Image (cartoon, rainbow, N blue to C red):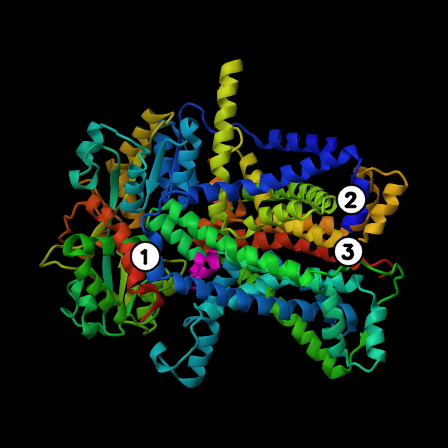
């Protein structure tokens, strides 16, 4: 690919402009990460000697187990369900094909709360067990510890598998089924063909989905804190707030980033030396294999289970709480919180999708390793906990704001105050910086599937790079652009740590409103707010599913 | 490209609503959940006409103040323990205040000698013990928590929580790190389960029969005992009684919720008025009646329920001394692997 595009690039005056655009967007997302690096240069008062001899091994092993568990969980649920709803006809398939995305709308700390609520001693499950067996106290029987590594893996797999599902389903839909049918006609069974043909073809998409899920796993604090699992992220906050060492915390954050880098490298390695462009432009209708009744029902149950646990259960419990405690939320400025959340999420989604496509296309135009490497490096910031990223954003924004203020005072004698970091603009900047990784990775994976001969054809016919993007690539990847924007929208609605720190005075979103109660495990009082976050995620999720379903030409 | 630029500029213009810097408004950073202090702030506004704008967060506040530099919009900060106040002082972000009202209303041991911070309420970290399973006199001192007779009977939240860090720091300040380490190892051995949940969840643990002794801040018992909306919490409160520590020795460990004025505050005068109001009879009795905390101002009544638990002897250890040992306390929790359970 590089050879072809390089030809067009040479002698093209616009190429320099594209490199500049790519580099400046890359720099924008890299800034907070760099400022965390700068903070990490400070002295850390022997924190490493302390950590190495005490808790660091546990942090690292817990983090690795968590990633392994969530990795296996999301791949298993995500790819199996995506394959079933794409290829087979079974009861409820039509509904499940979009419902499987719904858990994406549920913040993981809320699912953690709800699942614990149901499974702990006073919850429905253990209460019934006690009633049945006549036990009277927790000392009478054994029940698995909910607040544990295992619990955290289950909860995170349930809310994060939609990333894998989303991308795997898109990839399966775009696949050429002739290959699969060839495999079948050569005597391979459906399962073997799935594993040996369909999965390898969808591997880049699955790898992107899983790497996004694992980056979210790395940056999560709410869930692991609730489940009392000591991970690197927990360690960062401990060193930062309890040991009062910003530098030490930043250094731990750098360790976390190296974990993310390993992930990115693994994802790239899994794609290496393979190009997954569609080789054929012929598209046939999907096969729609009908399943025997037993298998059909088994498929229904298998696909319905993650939806029930990851969405149905929390939604039902929240509805239940909301019916009782709605007053607390309504007495507060509920509608303004909704408006704030939706407004911010819309802006963040639009800006992140626009910058994401420019960055991904810029990287495509300049496939020199350095530029691609820089883009990858810039987007690992996604694995950094939101609160740490927020500090990384505050520092440079503070400098910019103060410089602008000084300039304005000098020139016009008018103080500006904190123009960006003191207003909601700072929040949008923060969201874009944090979630650009999401849109870039989605769009990069999508652009990769367009064969470079398209670029070649467009450019031979006289299109510049910009015109080719507008007239060729954009129409082809439009579903992915919409998907990217919707992903950012949903994630911004749920975003908490960065919002808490970057927001201006008297500015609450649904997430921050819910947090003031949830932070003390009083989710009931803010259930209506939490329910609204979930509900606001449902519509984008439906849109996303529509977009993907229609991404296959000729598919009904 | 041009459309994108217009879009970006429009985006910034639309969201850059002027920050709340208007005169007659106080900007407040709060580690306390707003719903707890809103009635008190509303009363302040009603009396003075001064609006209070709040940002609630528990992380990154120090960094936020630092990065804002000379344009820092925040006037005052509210915290829920001495540790954060001391960290702010150490970062040189607090402005000294010399107020006759504050000096008169707040006892000297609950405020900084140079007026950098002021304690507004005290909270005792007490034991809630099972009425049935703990005999009177069985648990009297913090040291008893490490005694083998407490084996498998104690519930506690994470050792890293600010409330527990404060308590452990106090033990270090009194007894030194060596003794404190032995003590903490003993407590860990006696845990009924891996540290988890919030303070209320520990009382719930007693109700469920998981443990006999729970370490909590005293006001949570008041909140549970009077919780009309969640009657199950009343049942948790019903099975426990309050046990103050070390009444024949150095006294019960207490921490404070407090406030300070931030350097470069643009509205220092009104911010001081706010803190003075928080230390006044009105606000102090609101703290007591709404949140079951102990007022710092003498003569202000505590909540009748809290009153019924009896008065107690307070550990007079200097609060700054506790704050100084927070780092050591946090490292000790790591060293004995407290949070990984017994």
Q: Residue at x 29, y 62 (%)?
A: B335
Which residues make up the magenta segment?
A221-232
Q: Quadrant of residue A69?
A: bottom right
Q: CA distance from mark 3 to mark 2?
A: 19 Å
Left or right: B70 in relation to A545: left
Q: Are marks 2 and 1 in contact (CB under 8 Å)?
A: no
Q: Which label was assigned to residue A117?
A: none
What residue would you read off at disc 3? A449
Q: Is residue A24 magenta?
A: no
Picture mark count: 3
Residue A234, given in percent of the width and then of the height, sits at 42, 56
Q: Chain of mark 2?
A: A
Q: CA distance from mark 2 to mark 1?
A: 52 Å
Residue A57, given in percent of the width and then of the height, sits at 40, 64
Q: Is residue A229 magenta?
A: yes
What residue would you read off at disc 1? A50
> Upstream in the sequence, badge 2 or badge 1?
2
Task: Judge whether A542 appears above or below A397 on screen.
Answer: below
**Viewer-side label of 3, 2:** 2
Q: Which label was assigned to residue A6?
A: 2
């Amino acid at each position: 690919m590089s050879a072809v595009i390089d030809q067009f690039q040479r002698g093209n005056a616009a190429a320099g402009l594209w490199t500049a655009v790519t580099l400046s967007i890359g720099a924008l997302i890299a800034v907070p990460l760099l400022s965390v690096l700068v903070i990490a240069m400070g002295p850390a008062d022997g924190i490493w000697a302390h950590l190495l001899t005490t808790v660091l091994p546990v942090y690292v092993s817990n983090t690795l187990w968590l990633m392994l568990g969530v990795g296996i969980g999301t791949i298993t649920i995500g790819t199996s369900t995506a394959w079933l709803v794409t290829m087979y006809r079974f009861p409820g398939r039509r509904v499940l094909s979009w419902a499987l995305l719904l858990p994406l709308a549920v913040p993981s700390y809320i699912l953690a709360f709800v699942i614990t609520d149901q499974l702990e001693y006073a919850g429905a499950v253990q209460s019934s067990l006690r009633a049945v067996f006549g036990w009277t106290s927790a000392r009478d029987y054994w029940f698995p510890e909910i607040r544990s590594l295992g619990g955290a893996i289950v909860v995170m797999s349930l809310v994060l598998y939609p990333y894998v599902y989303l991308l795997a389903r898109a990839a399966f839909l775009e696949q050429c089924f002739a290959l699969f049918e060839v495999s079948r006609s050569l005597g391979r069974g459906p399962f073997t063909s799935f594993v040996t043909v369909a999965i390898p073809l969808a591997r880049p998409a699955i790898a992107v989905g899983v790497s996004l899920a694992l980056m979210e796993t790395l940056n999560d604090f709410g869930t692991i804190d609730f489940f009392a699992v000591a991970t690197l992220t927990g360690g960062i906050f401990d060193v930062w707030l309890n040991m009062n060492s910003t530098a030490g915390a930043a250094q731990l954050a750098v360790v976390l980033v190296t974990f993310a880098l390993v992930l990115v490298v693994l994802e790239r390695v899994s794609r290496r030396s393979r190009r997954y462009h569609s080789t054929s432009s012929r598209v046939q209708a999907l096969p729609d294999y009908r399943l025997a009744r037993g298998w059909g029902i088994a498929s229904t149950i298998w696909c319905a289970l993650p939806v029930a646990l990851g969405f149905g259960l929390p939604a039902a419990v929240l509805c239940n709480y909301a019916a009782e405690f709605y007053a607390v939320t309504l007495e507060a400025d509920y509608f303004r919180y909704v408006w704030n959340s939706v407004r911010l999420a819309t802006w963040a989604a639009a800006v992140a999708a626009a910058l994401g496509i420019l960055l991904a296309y810029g990287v495509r135009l300049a496939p020199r390793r350095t530029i691609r490497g820089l883009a990858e490096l810039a987007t690992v910031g996604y694995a950094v906990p939101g609160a740490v990223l927020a500090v990384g954003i505050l520092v440079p924004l503070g400098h910019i704001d103060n410089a602008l203020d000084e300039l304005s005072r000098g020139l016009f004698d008018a103080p500006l105050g904190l123009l960006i970091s003191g207003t909601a603009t700072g929040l949008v900047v923060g969201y874009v910086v944090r979630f650009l990784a999401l849109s870039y990775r989605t769009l990069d994976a999508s652009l990769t599937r367009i064969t470079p001969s398209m670029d070649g054809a467009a450019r031979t016919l006289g299109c510049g790079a910009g015109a080719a993007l507008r007239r060729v690539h954009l129409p082809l990847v439009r579903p992915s652009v919409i998907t990217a924007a919707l992903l950012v929208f949903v994630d911004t609605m749920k975003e908490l740590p960065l919002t808490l720190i970057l927001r201006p005075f008297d500015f609450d979103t649904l997430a921050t409103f819910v947090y003031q109660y949830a932070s003390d495990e009083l989710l009931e009082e803010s259930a209506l707010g939490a329910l609204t976050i979930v509900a606001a995620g449902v519509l984008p999720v439906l849109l996303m599913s529509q977009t993907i379903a229609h991404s296959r030409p000729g598919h009904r | 490209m041009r459309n994108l630029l217009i879009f970006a500029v429009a985006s910034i213009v639309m969201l850059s609503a002027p920050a709340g810097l208007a005169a007659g408004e106080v900007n407040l950073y709060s580690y306390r959940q707003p719903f707890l202090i809103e009635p008190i702030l509303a009363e302040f506004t009603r009396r003075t006409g001064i609006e209070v704008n709040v940002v609630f967060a528990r992380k990154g506040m120090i960094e936020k103040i630092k990065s804002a530099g000379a344009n820092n919009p925040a006037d005052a900060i509210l915290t829920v323990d001495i540790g954060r106040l001391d960290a702010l002082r150490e970062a040189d972000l607090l402005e000294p205040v010399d107020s006759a009202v504050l000096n008169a209303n707040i006892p000297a041991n609950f405020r900084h000698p140079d007026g950098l911070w002021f304690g507004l309420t005290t909270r005792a970290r007490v034991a809630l013990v099972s009425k049935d399973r703990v005999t009177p006199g069985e648990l009297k001192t913090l040291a008893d928590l490490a005694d083998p007779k407490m084996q498998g009977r104690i519930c506690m939240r994470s050792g890293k929580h600010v409330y527990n860090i404060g308590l452990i720091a106090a033990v270090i300040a009194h007894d030194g790190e060596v003794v404190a380490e032995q003590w903490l190892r003993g407590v860990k051995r006696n845990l009924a389960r891996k540290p988890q949940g919030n303070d209320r969840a520990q009382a719930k643990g007693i109700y469920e029969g998981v443990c006999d002794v729970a370490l909590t801040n005293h006001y949570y018992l008041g909140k549970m005992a009077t919780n009309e909306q969640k009657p199950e919490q009343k049942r948790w409160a019903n099975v426990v009684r309050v046990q103050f520590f070390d009444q024949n020795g150095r006294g019960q460990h207490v921490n404070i919720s407090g406030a300070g004025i931030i350097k470069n505050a643009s509205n220092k005068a009104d911010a001081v008025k706010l803190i003075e109001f928080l230390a006044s009879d009105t606000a102090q009795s609101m703290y007591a009646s709404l949140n079951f905390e102990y007022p710092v101002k003498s003569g202000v009544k505590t909540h009748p329920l809290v009153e019924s638990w009896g008065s107690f002897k307070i550990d007079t250890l200097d609060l700054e001394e506790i704050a100084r040992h927070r780092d050591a306390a946090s490292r000790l929790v790591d060293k004995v692997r407290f949070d990984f359970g017994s």
